[in-house]
Image (cartoon, rainbow, N blue to C red):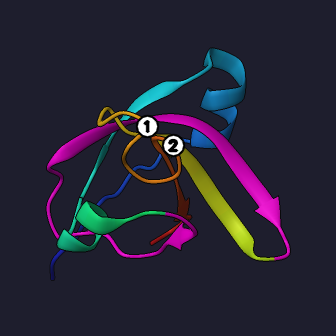
Amino acid sequence: PSYSYSYEPDLVALLLNAGPLTVPVAVSEDWQFYADGTLDVCGAELNHFLTLVGVSFDEKGNHWILKNSFGEGWGNKGYLLLTRNS
């Protein structure tokens, strides 16, 4: 039999207690042209870092609020909403 172990820290609690966090993400080609709205696609391998600055719970679902290092010309003034568990 094969066994696996996965650990995911409670990022919401860490964010509330420690403030913004640098997090690894698996960026896909869809991210390059992201302009606004919610992104729900990730790549297969961790290949970029973003700053996790918040979390959103609303009628549209649960989302991470992330800041990219590309400046205000990318995404929604440098930020993106990523569907949690995507």
Q: Is disc 2 placed on a helix, strand or loop? A: loop
Question: Which is more toward the observer, 59 or 14?
Answer: 59
Are dots 2 and 1 in contact, CB under 8 Å? yes
Q: Quadrant of residue 10?
A: top right
Question: Which is more toward the observer, 49 or 76?
Answer: 76
Examine the structure image and report whether residue 51 is included in the region drawn in magenta: yes
Query: From what the image shows, is residue 84 above or below residue 10?
Result: below
User: Mark 1 sits on what residue?
Assistant: 72
Alpha carbon of mark 2 to alpha carbon of mark 1: how far?
A: 4 Å
Examine the structure image and report whether residue 9 is included in the region drawn in magenta: no
User: Mark 2 sits on what residue?
Assistant: 77
Q: Which residues are magenta?
A: 36-59
| Residue at image coords 45%, 49% | 8
Q: Quadrant of residue 70?
A: top left
Side of 41 where 60 appears, left or right: right
| Residue at image coords 61%, 16% | 18
Who comes first in sequence, dot 2 or dot 1?
1
> If the image is split into quadrants, where does the C terminus sit?
bottom left
Give how far across and how far down residue 56 sits, in percent. Answer: 74, 54
For disc 1, the neighbor class at 10 Å (few under 14, some 14 to 19, many from 20) is few
Side of 59 where 31 appears, left or right: left
Give how far across and how far down residue 14 sits, in percent. Answer: 61, 29
> If the image is split into quadrants, where does the N terminus sit?
bottom left
